[in-house]
Protein backbone atom coordinates (compact mmCIF):
# COMPACT_ATOMS: atom_id res chain seq x y z
CA UNK A 1 0.00 0.00 0.00
CA UNK A 2 1.39 3.45 -0.92
CA UNK A 3 2.04 6.21 1.58
CA UNK A 4 -0.75 8.35 0.11
CA UNK A 5 -3.23 5.49 0.37
CA UNK A 6 -2.31 4.81 3.99
CA UNK A 7 -2.60 8.49 4.82
CA UNK A 8 -6.07 8.71 3.23
CA UNK A 9 -7.22 5.63 5.14
CA UNK A 10 -5.83 7.05 8.39
CA UNK A 11 -7.56 10.36 7.80
CA UNK A 12 -10.82 8.57 7.04
CA UNK A 13 -10.56 6.51 10.23
CA UNK A 14 -9.82 9.63 12.25
CA UNK A 15 -12.82 11.39 10.70
CA UNK A 16 -15.12 8.50 11.59
CA UNK A 17 -13.82 8.53 15.17
CA UNK A 18 -14.35 12.28 15.52
CA UNK A 19 -17.88 12.11 14.07
CA UNK A 20 -18.77 9.29 16.46
CA UNK A 21 -17.59 11.38 19.40
CA UNK A 22 -19.59 14.37 18.22
CA UNK A 23 -22.77 12.27 17.96
CA UNK A 24 -22.13 10.89 21.43
CA UNK A 25 -21.75 14.38 22.85
CA UNK A 26 -24.89 15.66 21.12
CA UNK A 27 -27.02 12.73 22.24
CA UNK A 28 -25.82 12.51 25.83
CA UNK A 29 -25.33 16.13 26.80
CA UNK A 30 -27.77 17.91 24.52
CA UNK A 31 -25.38 20.67 23.44
CA UNK A 32 -23.77 21.30 20.06
CA UNK A 33 -20.03 20.55 20.09
CA UNK A 34 -17.13 21.03 17.74
CA UNK A 35 -13.66 19.49 17.91
CA UNK A 36 -10.91 21.84 19.09
CA UNK A 37 -13.27 24.56 20.24
CA UNK A 38 -11.27 24.48 23.47
CA UNK A 39 -11.12 26.33 25.75
CA UNK A 40 -14.72 27.55 25.96
CA UNK A 41 -16.87 29.13 28.59
CA UNK A 42 -20.22 27.38 28.66
CA UNK A 43 -19.72 23.64 28.36
CA UNK A 44 -21.53 21.82 31.16
CA UNK A 45 -18.88 20.19 33.31
CA UNK A 46 -19.88 17.64 35.93
CA UNK A 47 -18.55 17.91 39.45
CA UNK A 48 -15.76 15.40 39.78
CA UNK A 49 -14.43 13.91 42.99
CA UNK A 50 -10.77 13.03 42.92
CA UNK A 51 -8.87 12.23 39.72
CA UNK A 52 -11.71 11.07 37.51
CA UNK A 53 -12.54 11.15 33.83
CA UNK A 54 -12.89 14.56 32.26
CA UNK A 55 -12.69 12.79 28.90
CA UNK A 56 -15.07 14.15 26.33
CA UNK A 57 -15.43 17.61 27.83
CA UNK A 58 -11.65 18.02 27.72
CA UNK A 59 -11.42 17.12 24.05
CA UNK A 60 -14.23 19.29 22.72
CA UNK A 61 -16.01 22.48 23.66
CA UNK A 62 -19.33 24.23 23.35
CA UNK A 63 -20.29 26.33 20.35
CA UNK A 64 -22.35 28.63 22.56
CA UNK A 65 -20.72 31.84 23.79
CA UNK A 66 -17.53 31.18 21.86
CA UNK A 67 -14.50 32.34 23.81
CA UNK A 68 -12.41 35.27 22.63
CA UNK A 69 -9.56 32.80 22.10
CA UNK A 70 -11.03 31.82 18.75
CA UNK A 71 -9.95 34.99 16.96
CA UNK A 72 -6.40 33.77 17.56
CA UNK A 73 -6.87 31.07 14.93
CA UNK A 74 -6.82 28.20 17.39
CA UNK A 75 -9.11 26.09 15.25
CA UNK A 76 -8.99 24.14 12.00
CA UNK A 77 -7.23 23.44 9.67
CA UNK A 78 -4.37 22.96 12.13
CA UNK A 79 -3.30 19.27 12.23
CA UNK A 80 -4.56 17.40 15.27
CA UNK A 81 -1.95 14.69 15.04
CA UNK A 82 1.28 16.59 15.47
CA UNK A 83 3.61 15.22 18.14
CA UNK A 84 4.36 17.40 21.16
CA UNK A 85 7.11 17.27 23.76
CA UNK A 86 6.61 19.01 27.09
CA UNK A 87 10.14 19.95 28.16
CA UNK A 88 11.42 21.05 31.55
CA UNK A 89 14.58 20.99 33.67
CA UNK A 90 15.08 19.81 37.26
CA UNK A 91 18.22 21.19 38.93
CA UNK A 92 20.20 19.79 41.83
CA UNK A 93 20.10 21.06 45.39
CA UNK A 94 16.39 21.75 45.82
CA UNK A 95 13.96 19.02 46.81
CA UNK A 96 11.09 21.36 45.95
CA UNK A 97 11.84 21.12 42.23
CA UNK A 98 11.81 17.33 42.36
CA UNK A 99 8.47 17.42 44.18
CA UNK A 100 7.05 19.87 41.67
CA UNK A 101 8.20 17.80 38.71
CA UNK A 102 6.64 14.65 40.12
CA UNK A 103 3.54 15.84 41.96
CA UNK A 104 2.52 18.66 39.64
CA UNK A 105 3.83 18.36 36.09
CA UNK A 106 4.27 14.60 35.80
CA UNK A 107 1.12 13.65 37.72
CA UNK A 108 -1.03 16.02 35.63
CA UNK A 109 0.51 14.74 32.39
CA UNK A 110 -0.08 11.15 33.52
CA UNK A 111 -3.68 11.99 34.34
CA UNK A 112 -4.36 14.00 31.19
CA UNK A 113 -3.16 11.40 28.70
CA UNK A 114 -5.68 8.95 30.11
CA UNK A 115 -8.62 11.29 29.56
CA UNK A 116 -8.58 12.15 25.85
CA UNK A 117 -8.99 9.23 23.41
CA UNK A 118 -5.76 8.63 21.55
CA UNK A 119 -7.49 8.60 18.16
CA UNK A 120 -8.43 12.26 18.65
CA UNK A 121 -4.93 13.62 19.14
CA UNK A 122 -1.23 13.32 18.49
CA UNK A 123 1.38 11.94 20.86
CA UNK A 124 2.27 14.13 23.83
CA UNK A 125 5.49 13.09 25.56
CA UNK A 126 7.05 14.51 28.71
CA UNK A 127 10.82 15.12 28.53
CA UNK A 128 12.38 15.85 31.91
CA UNK A 129 15.98 17.02 31.67
CA UNK A 130 17.63 16.65 35.06
CA UNK A 131 20.89 17.00 36.95
CA UNK A 132 22.52 13.61 37.49
CA UNK A 133 21.96 13.83 41.25
CA UNK A 134 18.18 13.90 40.88
CA UNK A 135 17.62 11.48 37.99
CA UNK A 136 16.99 8.53 40.31
CA UNK A 137 14.40 10.49 42.28
CA UNK A 138 12.13 11.20 39.35
CA UNK A 139 9.13 8.97 38.54
CA UNK A 140 10.35 5.40 37.97
CA UNK A 141 7.92 4.89 35.10
CA UNK A 142 9.80 7.49 33.04
CA UNK A 143 12.28 5.91 30.64
CA UNK A 144 15.89 6.93 31.29
CA UNK A 145 17.57 7.92 28.04
CA UNK A 146 21.24 7.18 28.52
CA UNK A 147 22.09 8.40 25.03
CA UNK A 148 19.76 11.21 23.93
CA UNK A 149 21.15 11.04 20.39
CA UNK A 150 19.35 7.71 20.03
CA UNK A 151 15.76 8.65 19.37
CA UNK A 152 13.30 6.95 21.72
CA UNK A 153 11.30 4.07 20.33
CA UNK A 154 7.88 3.64 21.90
CA UNK A 155 6.09 0.32 21.71
CA UNK A 156 3.74 0.90 20.00
CA UNK A 157 5.01 4.24 18.57
CA UNK A 158 1.68 5.96 19.26
CA UNK A 159 2.00 5.69 23.04
CA UNK A 160 2.64 8.80 25.12
CA UNK A 161 5.84 8.38 27.08
CA UNK A 162 7.83 10.14 29.78
CA UNK A 163 11.60 10.33 29.37
CA UNK A 164 14.31 11.48 31.76
CA UNK A 165 17.46 12.87 30.16
CA UNK A 166 20.50 13.55 32.32
CA UNK A 167 21.92 17.04 31.91
CA UNK A 168 24.48 18.26 34.43
CA UNK A 169 25.89 21.74 33.77
CA UNK A 170 29.66 21.99 34.05
CA UNK A 171 31.15 23.47 37.22
CA UNK A 172 32.40 26.50 35.31
CA UNK A 173 29.18 27.15 33.38
CA UNK A 174 28.41 30.86 33.09
CA UNK A 175 24.83 30.43 34.30
CA UNK A 176 25.79 29.47 37.83
CA UNK A 177 25.63 33.22 38.47
CA UNK A 178 21.97 33.21 37.39
CA UNK A 179 20.88 29.62 37.77
CA UNK A 180 17.36 30.00 36.44
CA UNK A 181 18.80 30.09 32.92
CA UNK A 182 19.68 26.41 33.31
CA UNK A 183 15.95 25.82 32.83
CA UNK A 184 16.45 27.05 29.25
CA UNK A 185 20.10 26.56 28.34
CA UNK A 186 19.72 22.79 27.89
CA UNK A 187 17.61 23.51 24.81
CA UNK A 188 20.71 24.94 23.12
CA UNK A 189 22.83 21.83 23.70
CA UNK A 190 23.78 20.24 20.35
CA UNK A 191 23.54 16.73 21.82
CA UNK A 192 19.82 17.19 22.45
CA UNK A 193 18.84 18.60 19.06
CA UNK A 194 18.02 15.27 17.32
CA UNK A 195 15.76 14.23 20.20
CA UNK A 196 13.98 17.58 20.37
CA UNK A 197 13.64 17.91 16.60
CA UNK A 198 11.87 14.56 16.46
CA UNK A 199 8.77 16.39 17.74
CA UNK A 200 6.59 18.82 15.80
CA UNK A 201 6.04 21.17 18.74
CA UNK A 202 7.55 21.95 22.13
CA UNK A 203 5.94 23.24 25.30
CA UNK A 204 8.75 24.85 27.31
CA UNK A 205 7.59 25.07 30.90
CA UNK A 206 8.68 25.26 34.52
CA UNK A 207 8.09 22.42 36.97
CA UNK A 208 5.53 24.14 39.23
CA UNK A 209 2.74 23.67 36.72
CA UNK A 210 -0.04 21.32 35.71
CA UNK A 211 -1.41 20.64 32.27
CA UNK A 212 -5.06 19.79 31.71
CA UNK A 213 -6.61 17.27 29.32
CA UNK A 214 -7.60 20.21 27.10
CA UNK A 215 -3.93 20.78 26.28
CA UNK A 216 -3.70 17.48 24.45
CA UNK A 217 -5.85 18.79 21.58
CA UNK A 218 -4.49 22.35 21.63
CA UNK A 219 -2.85 22.98 18.25
CA UNK A 220 -2.88 26.76 17.66
CA UNK A 221 -1.62 28.30 14.46
CA UNK A 222 0.22 30.99 16.34
CA UNK A 223 3.26 30.80 18.59
CA UNK A 224 1.74 30.91 22.06
CA UNK A 225 3.28 32.33 25.22
CA UNK A 226 1.85 32.49 28.69
CA UNK A 227 1.26 35.67 30.60
CA UNK A 228 4.02 37.37 32.53
CA UNK A 229 3.77 40.05 35.18
CA UNK A 230 6.99 41.97 34.73
CA UNK A 231 5.91 44.87 32.50
CA UNK A 232 3.74 46.75 34.96
CA UNK A 233 5.28 50.22 34.84
CA UNK A 234 5.78 52.42 31.79
CA UNK A 235 9.38 52.87 32.88
CA UNK A 236 10.02 49.14 32.50
CA UNK A 237 8.43 49.09 29.06
CA UNK A 238 10.58 51.98 27.89
CA UNK A 239 13.61 50.31 29.43
CA UNK A 240 13.18 47.11 27.44
CA UNK A 241 12.59 49.16 24.30
CA UNK A 242 15.90 50.88 24.99
CA UNK A 243 17.55 47.49 25.48
CA UNK A 244 16.24 46.41 22.10
CA UNK A 245 17.79 49.46 20.43
CA UNK A 246 21.15 48.85 22.12
CA UNK A 247 21.14 45.26 20.87
CA UNK A 248 19.91 46.18 17.37
CA UNK A 249 16.80 44.10 17.95
CA UNK A 250 13.10 44.74 17.42
CA UNK A 251 10.47 45.06 20.14
CA UNK A 252 7.00 45.13 18.58
CA UNK A 253 5.13 46.23 21.68
CA UNK A 254 4.14 42.79 22.96
CA UNK A 255 4.53 43.09 26.72
CA UNK A 256 4.27 40.64 29.61
CA UNK A 257 5.47 37.65 27.63
CA UNK A 258 5.44 34.70 30.03
CA UNK A 259 8.03 32.01 30.61
CA UNK A 260 5.90 29.28 29.03
CA UNK A 261 6.36 28.88 25.28
CA UNK A 262 4.38 26.63 22.95
CA UNK A 263 5.23 26.47 19.29
CA UNK A 264 6.98 24.88 16.36
CA UNK A 265 10.08 23.04 17.55
CA UNK A 266 12.49 24.68 15.13
CA UNK A 267 11.18 28.12 16.11
CA UNK A 268 11.64 27.48 19.82
CA UNK A 269 15.13 26.06 19.36
CA UNK A 270 16.24 28.89 17.09
CA UNK A 271 15.27 31.50 19.70
CA UNK A 272 16.95 29.97 22.74
CA UNK A 273 20.59 30.81 21.83
CA UNK A 274 19.64 34.44 21.21
CA UNK A 275 17.75 34.51 24.50
CA UNK A 276 20.86 33.31 26.31
CA UNK A 277 22.88 35.98 24.53
CA UNK A 278 20.45 38.73 25.60
CA UNK A 279 20.40 37.53 29.21
CA UNK A 280 24.21 37.48 29.30
CA UNK A 281 24.30 41.00 27.90
CA UNK A 282 21.98 42.23 30.67
CA UNK A 283 24.00 40.56 33.41
CA UNK A 284 27.34 41.84 32.06
CA UNK A 285 26.15 45.35 31.26
CA UNK A 286 27.01 48.26 33.61
CA UNK A 287 23.87 49.93 32.30
CA UNK A 288 21.32 47.14 32.68
CA UNK A 289 22.80 45.08 35.52
CA UNK A 290 21.65 47.59 38.12
CA UNK A 291 18.73 46.38 40.19
CA UNK A 292 16.06 49.00 40.77
CA UNK A 293 13.63 46.68 42.50
CA UNK A 294 10.60 44.85 41.20
CA UNK A 295 8.62 45.71 39.16
CA UNK A 296 10.72 48.69 38.00
CA UNK A 297 13.82 46.79 36.81
CA UNK A 298 14.78 43.61 38.64
CA UNK A 299 17.82 41.49 37.76
CA UNK A 300 16.07 38.46 39.26
CA UNK A 301 13.76 38.34 36.24
CA UNK A 302 16.47 38.75 33.60
CA UNK A 303 15.21 35.62 31.87
CA UNK A 304 11.78 37.22 31.49
CA UNK A 305 13.24 40.36 29.93
CA UNK A 306 15.37 38.29 27.56
CA UNK A 307 12.48 36.04 26.61
CA UNK A 308 10.16 38.95 25.89
CA UNK A 309 12.70 40.68 23.69
CA UNK A 310 13.53 37.53 21.73
CA UNK A 311 9.88 36.66 21.06
CA UNK A 312 9.28 40.21 19.83
CA UNK A 313 12.37 40.09 17.63
CA UNK A 314 11.91 36.67 16.03
CA UNK A 315 8.18 36.36 15.40
CA UNK A 316 5.85 38.81 13.62
CA UNK A 317 3.39 40.32 16.05
CA UNK A 318 0.35 38.81 14.34
CA UNK A 319 1.84 35.34 14.75
CA UNK A 320 2.26 35.62 18.53
CA UNK A 321 -0.55 34.96 20.98
CA UNK A 322 0.12 36.27 24.48
CA UNK A 323 -2.44 34.00 26.08
CA UNK A 324 -3.56 35.45 29.40
CA UNK A 325 -6.71 33.34 29.65
CA UNK A 326 -5.65 29.71 29.42
CA UNK A 327 -1.84 29.46 29.75
CA UNK A 328 0.13 30.23 32.94
CA UNK A 329 -3.15 30.64 34.83
CA UNK A 330 -2.43 31.05 38.54
CA UNK A 331 -2.86 27.82 40.50
CA UNK A 332 -5.30 29.45 42.94
CA UNK A 333 -7.70 30.24 40.10
CA UNK A 334 -11.36 29.24 40.17
CA UNK A 335 -11.47 29.10 36.37
CA UNK A 336 -13.17 26.09 34.85
CA UNK A 337 -10.60 23.44 34.00
CA UNK A 338 -12.11 23.00 30.56
CA UNK A 339 -11.17 26.62 29.79
CA UNK A 340 -7.50 26.18 30.73
CA UNK A 341 -4.60 24.38 29.08
CA UNK A 342 -1.85 25.01 31.62
CA UNK A 343 -1.78 26.38 35.18
CA UNK A 344 1.29 27.83 36.87
CA UNK A 345 2.05 28.61 40.52
CA UNK A 346 2.88 32.26 40.83
CA UNK A 347 5.23 32.90 43.79
CA UNK A 348 4.09 34.45 47.03
CA UNK A 349 1.62 34.11 49.88
CA UNK A 350 -0.34 37.18 48.82
CA UNK A 351 -2.80 35.25 46.69
CA UNK A 352 -6.03 34.22 48.47
CA UNK A 353 -7.20 30.64 48.83
CA UNK A 354 -5.40 27.65 47.42
CA UNK A 355 -3.41 26.23 45.61
CA UNK A 356 -0.19 27.89 46.80
CA UNK A 357 3.15 26.25 46.09
CA UNK A 358 4.77 27.78 49.16
CA UNK A 359 2.08 26.30 51.39
CA UNK A 360 2.59 22.97 49.59
CA UNK A 361 6.33 23.14 50.32
CA UNK A 362 5.58 23.84 53.98
CA UNK A 363 3.47 20.69 54.17
CA UNK A 364 0.21 22.53 54.82
CA UNK A 365 -1.79 20.52 52.28
CA UNK A 366 -2.76 17.05 53.44
CA UNK A 367 -5.33 14.42 52.56
CA UNK A 368 -7.03 15.14 55.88
CA UNK A 369 -7.52 18.81 55.03
CA UNK A 370 -8.40 18.18 51.39
CA UNK A 371 -10.15 14.80 51.05
CA UNK A 372 -10.25 13.42 47.55
CA UNK A 373 -14.05 13.36 47.46
CA UNK A 374 -14.23 17.08 48.26
CA UNK A 375 -12.13 18.15 45.28
CA UNK A 376 -13.88 19.25 42.10
CA UNK A 377 -11.58 18.67 39.15
CA UNK A 378 -13.76 20.93 37.03
CA UNK A 379 -12.16 23.92 38.82
CA UNK A 380 -8.45 24.70 38.45
CA UNK A 381 -7.47 25.15 42.10
CA UNK A 382 -9.08 21.83 43.04
CA UNK A 383 -7.59 20.18 39.95
CA UNK A 384 -4.14 21.42 41.00
CA UNK A 385 -4.67 20.14 44.54
CA UNK A 386 -5.82 16.74 43.29
CA UNK A 387 -2.76 16.36 41.07
CA UNK A 388 -0.40 17.37 43.90
CA UNK A 389 -1.95 15.16 46.58
CA UNK A 390 -3.42 12.24 44.67
CA UNK A 391 -1.59 12.06 41.36
CA UNK A 392 -0.12 8.65 40.71
Image: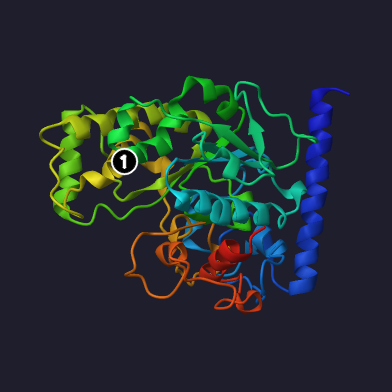
Q: Position of residue 275 (x, y in %)?
A: 33, 32
Residue at x 55% of width, y 52% of height? 105
In the picture shown, does residue 66 fall above or below 114? below
In this orientation, which residue lies closer to the viewer: 183 or 113? Answer: 183
Q: Is residue 231 above or below residue 390?
A: above
In the displayed structure, does residue 257 sit left or right of residue 46?
Answer: left
Q: Which residue is located at x 61 percent, y 74 percent?
A: 376
The 10 Å Cα crowd at callout 1, few under 14, some 14 to 19, many 20 or more, is many
Furthest-right residue in this view: 1
Q: Give the percent coordinates (x, y) of residue 27.
A: 80, 71
Q: Residue 250 is drawn in which quadrant?
A: top left
Element at badge 1?
Answer: helix
Residue beneath label 1, please? 303
Depicted 23 relative to depicted 17: above or below: below
* Colour treatment of the image: rainbow
Residue 340, image x and y in percent? 53, 60
Number of numbered callouts drawn? 1
Q: Position of residue 284 (x, y in %)?
A: 18, 30
Location of the C terminus by quadrant is bottom right
Q: Nearer the viewer, residue 171 or 60?
A: 171
Residue sitting at 52 percent across and 53 percent down? 99
Depth order, front residue of 200/292: 292
Query: Where's the N terminus, which quadrant?
Result: top right
| Residue 306 shown left or right of residue 243 in the figure | right
Amino acid sequence: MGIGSRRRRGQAAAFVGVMALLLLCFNTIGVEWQVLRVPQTSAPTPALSGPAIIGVVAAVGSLRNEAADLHNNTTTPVPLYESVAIVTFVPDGHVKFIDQAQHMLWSSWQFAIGQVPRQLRGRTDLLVFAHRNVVARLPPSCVRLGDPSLLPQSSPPSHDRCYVVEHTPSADAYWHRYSFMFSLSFLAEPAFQPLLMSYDRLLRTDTDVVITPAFLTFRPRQFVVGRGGDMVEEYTKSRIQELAIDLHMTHQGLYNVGSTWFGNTSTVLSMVPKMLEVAKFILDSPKYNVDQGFPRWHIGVTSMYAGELVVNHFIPKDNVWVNSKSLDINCNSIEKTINVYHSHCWPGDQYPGYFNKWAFERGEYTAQRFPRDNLDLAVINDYFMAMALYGK
